[in-house]
């Protein structure tokens, strides 16, 4: 059985992950409006991944006798001046999410909830390292490009090669996560 504190914390994180999906969709739309379809694709893939993160919290709460709750999702910012600014917004958001995950780890430790720690939060701690790194690398690469439009075109094309997650990944994130962890 899940404690009320963990249930509340996980429901808050569930909704934060859905906000992250909204943010990535908004950034993706911004890129698409500028015909940077590779970056747009990457952002949409990231949005679907964030939705799968929300589902991990949803399933954990549900599987432990809790009730997943959904809050209104705030409208994300939608105006950036450059691709670098757009990726910087994504990076800054991932830093916030990392803090939220670390706060949940502290809460689970205080509640002595090993199912929360080992069952889901350990995975998210590692996932956030990857999330921050990917967005930080994009910011750094865009800084290096400066105003070189040809290099921007090539980088955009590279980011368009990211695999797009399937609906199955969102519906059953644990199975998809296991496949991803196995290198599939």
Image (cartoon, grey):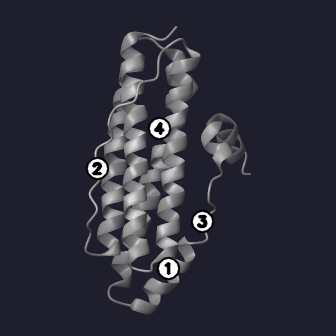
Find the distance from the CA under tag 2 to the CA under tag 1. 28 Å
Q: Looking at the picture, does residue 6 appear above or below residue 164?
A: above
Residue on which disc 3 sits: 162
Marks 2 and 1 close (CB-CB < 8 Å): no
- The quarter of the picture where residue 62 lies is top right
- Mark 3: secondary structure: loop
Marks 4 and 2 close (CB-CB < 8 Å): no
Marks 3 and 2 close (CB-CB < 8 Å): no
Whole-percent x, y for residue 129 in the image: 46, 48
Count neighbours of disc 3 (C-alpha within 10 A) and say few if under 14, some if 14 to 19, many if 20 or more.
Answer: some
Residue on which disc 4 sits: 125
Find the distance from the CA under tag 4 to the CA under tag 2. 26 Å
Find the distance from the CA under tag 4 to the CA under tag 3. 22 Å
Which one is in front, 182 or 59?
Answer: 59
- Mark 4: secondary structure: helix
Marked residue nearer the N-terminal end (4 or 3): 4
- Mark 1: secondary structure: helix
Count neighbours of disc 1 (C-alpha within 10 A) and say few if under 14, some if 14 to 19, many if 20 or more.
Answer: some
Number of the front mark, 2 or 1: 2
Marked residue nearer the N-terminal end (3 or 2): 2
Count neighbours of disc 2 (C-alpha within 10 A) and say few if under 14, some if 14 to 19, many if 20 or more.
Answer: few
Residue on which disc 2 sits: 75
Marks 3 and 1 close (CB-CB < 8 Å): no
Determine the residue positioned at 34% across, 31% down.
71
Q: Looking at the picture, does residue 21 appear above or below residue 164?
A: above
Number of the front mark, 1 or 4: 1
Q: Which mark is residue 155?
A: 1
Which one is in front, 107 or 27?
Answer: 27
Find the distance from the CA under tag 3 to the CA under tag 2. 26 Å
Find the distance from the CA under tag 3 to the CA under tag 1. 12 Å
Marks 4 and 3 close (CB-CB < 8 Å): no
Q: Which mark is residue 7?
A: none
């Amino acid at each position: 059985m899940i404690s009320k504190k963990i249930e509340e914390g996980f429901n808050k994180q569930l909704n934060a992950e859905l906000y992250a999906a909204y943010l990535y969709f908004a950034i993706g739309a911004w890129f698409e409006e500028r015909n940077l379809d590779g970056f747009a694709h990457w952002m949409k893939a990231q949005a679907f991944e964030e939705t799968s993160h929300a589902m991990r919290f949803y399933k954990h709460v549900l599987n432990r006798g809790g009730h997943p709750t959904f809050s209104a999702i705030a409208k994300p910012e939608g105006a950036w001046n450059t691709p670098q600014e757009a990726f910087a917004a994504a990076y800054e958001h991932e830093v916030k999410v990392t803090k939220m995950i670390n706060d949940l780890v502290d809460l689970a430790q205080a509640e002595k909830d090993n199912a929360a720690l080992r069952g889901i939060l350990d995975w998210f701690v590692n996932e956030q390292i990857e999330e921050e790194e990917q967005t930080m690398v994009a910011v750094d690469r865009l800084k290096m490009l400066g105003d070189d439009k040809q290099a921007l075109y090539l980088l955009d094309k590279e980011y368009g090669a990211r695999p797009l997650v399937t609906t199955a990944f969102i519906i059953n994130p644990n199975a998809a996560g296991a496949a991803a962890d196995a290198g599939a």
